[in-house]
Image (cartoon, rainbow, N blue to C red):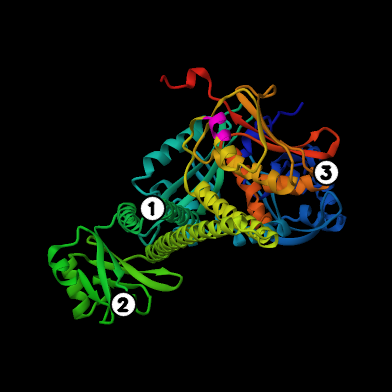
C-alpha cells in the first residue's frame, strides 16, 4: 500500500498561496489530475465545479477542444510561458486564453505542474474599463492592496505600481488633518461585518497640492462572517465640491434678493425703502461702508439720502456729486456699474475715492427705474481689495430690485396726486352742479305757479330731469365715499332714517309697517331708502303705493328684513337678473340712473347684509315689485346706556 503524500492531504491550504487575482490557477499532480484549482479557474473552464480530481486532459480539452493541442501542452518537458490559444467558453462563445505552465523538478513538490490561465479578451475589457474609469477601484487586505487600478496618477500623481509595490501607502497620502478620522473608519471596516461607508477627505498629491476625494468602501467577509478584505472606489470630489459651493452661493444670493424684495414691497415711502435696503444689503453681505444717492429733478446732481459709516472727510467733499464729471458719469449718465478696486490698479482720482472712504474696494451700482437712472448705491469693503464676480452679479441685481421699488414708490405718489386731483374736481363739480340745480328748481317752481297749462307742464318735466341729474351726482358722491371711507358702524334708528326720507319726498305715498329697530350702520344708510323710494316713484307711475316693512329674520339670528314694495307695474322675471347684477355692486354694468341700485347693493354689503328682488304678490310680477334686504340688528346687550 502506497504512502500518502502529505502535500495533497489539504491541497486548499497548501496551494492557496499560489492564488492570484484575475488568473486561473490549476495544480496538477504527477498523474496529471487536478489537485487544486482557484475560483478564477473554475470561472474560466467550462466544466466548473467538477474540476478537482478530474483528468487534466479532459479539463483542458473541454476548454481548447483540440486533443492535439492539449497533448502538446501536457506532454512537453519544458515550461511554457505566455502563449495565446483559441478557446470556447461555457456557452460556446469564442475566447482567447493565455496559457503558461511550470513543472517543479525538486523537493516534495517534484513532478507537480502549475498551470496559469488568463482570459485575454476578458482582461482586455477589464483594462478598458479602468482606462475609461474616472476614479480608482481598489481592493485591500491586512497585508496591503491587491488591486489598485483606474485614474490613479491623475488623482494622486503616483502610479498604480507605487501603491501595489508598497512604495506609497494610502494612509500616508491622506491629509494629516483628515488622517485620524480616515484611520478610525478603516478600523471599523476591518472589524464590523457587512459595513459600507462613504467618506470625503483630502489627500496630498505627489506634487504637494491638496485635493478632495470621495471614497465609497465596503468590506467582504469570509465564510465565518469575519471581514477578509475591503474594496471600493475613490473619486475626485473637487467638481462636486465646487458644485456644492456654487449651490450654496446661489442659495445665499436668492436669500439676499428675497429680503431686498421684501423690503421693497413693504416700504411705505421712498425714504423708508432707501434706508432699509441699504441697511439690509450691508448686513447680509458683510460690507463696511454704504451710501445711497438720488438724482435731483434736473438730473445734474446726485444727492446723498442715506449713508452708513461714511467718513466725514468723504461727506464733506462728496455729499453732492456732479453726475457729468468723471468717473461718476459712467454710473449716473451711462447707467453702468463701476468697480473701483485697490487690486485693479486704480487711477489717481479713483485712488483718492478709496482713500477718502477708507475702503479697499468700492462698488458703484446704478439704481434703474424702467431703464432710467434715478440714483446709485455705493458699497465698500475694507478687508478685501477685489469684489468677486458672483458678488458683482448680486449687487447689480440688488440695484435693479431697489430701482423697481423706487419706481413703485414714484407711481404710488403719482397715483395719490391724481386721486387728490380727481376728488377735488368731483367735489367742485358736485357742489357747483347742486347749486345750479337748486336755482333751476326755484325757477321751475315759479313757472309752475304761473297761469298757463303748457308752461307749467314743461316746468314739471324740467324739474324731474333736474331731480334725476342731482340724484346721479349724489350717487357718484356716495360711491366715492364707500370706496374711500372704511365702515364706522354704530347703532342707528331704522325708523328715524325711514321717516326722514319720507318727509324729504312728500310726493311719494309711503306707508310704514313693522316694529322699530336699531341696526348697525352709518350716515350713508339713508341713501338705500332714497334710491329705492326714488325708483318706486319713477317706475311705479302716478298713484303707486309704496310700503316699507321691517320684520325679524326667521332664517338668520339677530338680523332684520327690510322690504320696500310698490303697487306699480312690477318687474318681469327676465329683467330681475339684470337688476340683481346692479344690486351686486357691479359698476361696470351700470351707468347714469342705474347707479342707484349699485349704491344699494354696495351699502347693504357694507353693513353685513344681503339684498334680493321678489314679486309683491308671489307669482304675479304685474302687481308690483318688492326689494328686500337684511341688516344686522343691535342686540340689547350691545346698546350703550343713555
The residue where tag 2 is placed is 298
Percent from the top left, x then y, of residue 295?
Answer: 31, 71
- Image: magenta residue range: 493-499
Percent from the top left, x then y, of residue 255?
Answer: 43, 51
In this orientation, which residue lies closer to the viewer: 284 or 189?
284
The secondary element bearing badge 1 is classed as: loop
In this orientation, which residue lies closer to the viewer: 134 or 568?
568
Of labels 2 and 1, earlier in sequence is 1
Which numbered tag is attached to residue 267? Answer: 1
Task: Name the residue at the bottom extreme.
Answer: 325
Q: Is residue 57 left or right of residue 404?
A: right
- Mark 1 Cα shell of 10 Å, populated few (<14), some (14-19), many (≥20): some
Question: How much space separates mark 3 and mark 1, taking CA atoms?
Answer: 51 Å
Residue 165 shows in the view: no
* 3 or 2: mark nearer the eye: 3
Of labels 3 and 2, earlier in sequence is 2
Amino acid at each position: 500500500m502506497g504512502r500518502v503524500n502529505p502535500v495533497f492531504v489539504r491541497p486548499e491550504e497548501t496551494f492557496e498561496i499560489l492564488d492570484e487575482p484575475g488568473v486561473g490557477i490549476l495544480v496538477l499532480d504527477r498523474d496529471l489530475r487536478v489537485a487544486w484549482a482557484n475560483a478564477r479557474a473554475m470561472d474560466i473552464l467550462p466544466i466548473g465545479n467538477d474540476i478537482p480530481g478530474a483528468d487534466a486532459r479532459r479539463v483542458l480539452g473541454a476548454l481548447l477542444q483540440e486533443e492535439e493541442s492539449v497533448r502538446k501542452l501536457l506532454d512537453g518537458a519544458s515550461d511554457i510561458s505566455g502563449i495565446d490559444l483559441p478557446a470556447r467558453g461555457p456557452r460556446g462563445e469564442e475566447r482567447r486564453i493565455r496559457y503558461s505552465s511550470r513543472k517543479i523538478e525538486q523537493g516534495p513538490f517534484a513532478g507537480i505542474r502549475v498551470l496559469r490561465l488568463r482570459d485575454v479578451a476578458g482582461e482586455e475589457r477589464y483594462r478598458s474599463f479602468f482606462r475609461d474609469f474616472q476614479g480608482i477601484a481598489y481592493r485591500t487586505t491586512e497585508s496591503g492592496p491587491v488591486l489598485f487600478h483606474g485614474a490613479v496618477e491623475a488623482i494622486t500623481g503616483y502610479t498604480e505600481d507605487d501603491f501595489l509595490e508598497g512604495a506609497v501607502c494610502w494612509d500616508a497620502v491622506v491629509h494629516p488633518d483628515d488622517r485620524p478620522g480616515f484611520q478610525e473608519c478603516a478600523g471599523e471596516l476591518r472589524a464590523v461585518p457587512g459595513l459600507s461607508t462613504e467618506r470625503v477627505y483630502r489627500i496630498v498629491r505627489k506634487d504637494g497640492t491638496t485635493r478632495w476625494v470621495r471614497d465609497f468602501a465596503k468590506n467582504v467577509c469570509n465564510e465565518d462572517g469575519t471581514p477578509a478584505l475591503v474594496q471600493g472606489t475613490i473619486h475626485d470630489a473637487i467638481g462636486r465640491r465646487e458644485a456644492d459651493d456654487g449651490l450654496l452661493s446661489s442659495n445665499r444670493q436668492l436669500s439676499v434678493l428675497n429680503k431686498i424684495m421684501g423690503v421693497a414691497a413693504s416700504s411705505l415711502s421712498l425714504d423708508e425703502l432707501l434706508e432699509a435696503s441699504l441697511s439690509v444689503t450691508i448686513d447680509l453681505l458683510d460690507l463696511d461702508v454704504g451710501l445711497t444717492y438720488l438724482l435731483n429733478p434736473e438730473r445734474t446732481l446726485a444727492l446723498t439720502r442715506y449713508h452708513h459709516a461714511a467718513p466725514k472727510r468723504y461727506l464733506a467733499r462728496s455729499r453732492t456729486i456732479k453726475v457729468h464729471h468723471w468717473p461718476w458719469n459712467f454710473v449716473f449718465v451711462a447707467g453702468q456699474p463701476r468697480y473701483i478696486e485697490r487690486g485693479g490698479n486704480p487711477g489717481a482720482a479713483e485712488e483718492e475715492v478709496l482713500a477718502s472712504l477708507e475702503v479697499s474696494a468700492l462698488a458703484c451700482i446704478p439704481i434703474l427705474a424702467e431703464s432710467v437712472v434715478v440714483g446709485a448705491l455705493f458699497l465698500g469693503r475694507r478687508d478685501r481689495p477685489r469684489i468677486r464676480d458672483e458678488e458683482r452679479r448680486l449687487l447689480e441685481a440688488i440695484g435693479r430690485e431697489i430701482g423697481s421699488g423706487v419706481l413703485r414708490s414714484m407711481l404710488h405718489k403719482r397715483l395719490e396726486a391724481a386721486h387728490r386731483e380727481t376728488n377735488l374736481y368731483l367735489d367742485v363739480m358736485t357742489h357747483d352742479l347742486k347749486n345750479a340745480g337748486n336755482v333751476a328748481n326755484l325757477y321751475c317752481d315759479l313757472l309752475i305757479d304761473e297761469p298757463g297749462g303748457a308752461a307749467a307742464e314743461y316746468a314739471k318735466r324740467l324739474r324731474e330731469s333736474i331731480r334725476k341729474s342731482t340724484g346721479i351726482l349724489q350717487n357718484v358722491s356716495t360711491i366715492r365715499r364707500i370706496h374711500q371711507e372704511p365702515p364706522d358702524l354704530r347703532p342707528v334708528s331704522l325708523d328715524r332714517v325711514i321717516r326722514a326720507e319720507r318727509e324729504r319726498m312728500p310726493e311719494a305715498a309711503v306707508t310704514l309697517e313693522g316694529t322699530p329697530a336699531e341696526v348697525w350702520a352709518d350716515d350713508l344708510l339713508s341713501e338705500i331708502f332714497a334710491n329705492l323710494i326714488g325708483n318706486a316713484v319713477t317706475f311705479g307711475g302716478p298713484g303707486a303705493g309704496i310700503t316699507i316693512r321691517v320684520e325679524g329674520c326667521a332664517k338668520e339670528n339677530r338680523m332684520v328684513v327690510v322690504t320696500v314694495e310698490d303697487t306699480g307695474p312690477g318687474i318681469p322675471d327676465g329683467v330681475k337678473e339684470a337688476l340683481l347684477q346692479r344690486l351686486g355692486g357691479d359698476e361696470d354694468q351700470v351707468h347714469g340712473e342705474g347707479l342707484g341700485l349699485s349704491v344699494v347693493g354696495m351699502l347693504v354689503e357694507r353693513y353685513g347684509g344681503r339684498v334680493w328682488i321678489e314679486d309683491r304678490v308671489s307669482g304675479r310680477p304685474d302687481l308690483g315689485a318688492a326689494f328686500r334686504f337684511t341688516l344686522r340688528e343691535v342686540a340689547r346687550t350691545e346698546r350703550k346706556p343713555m
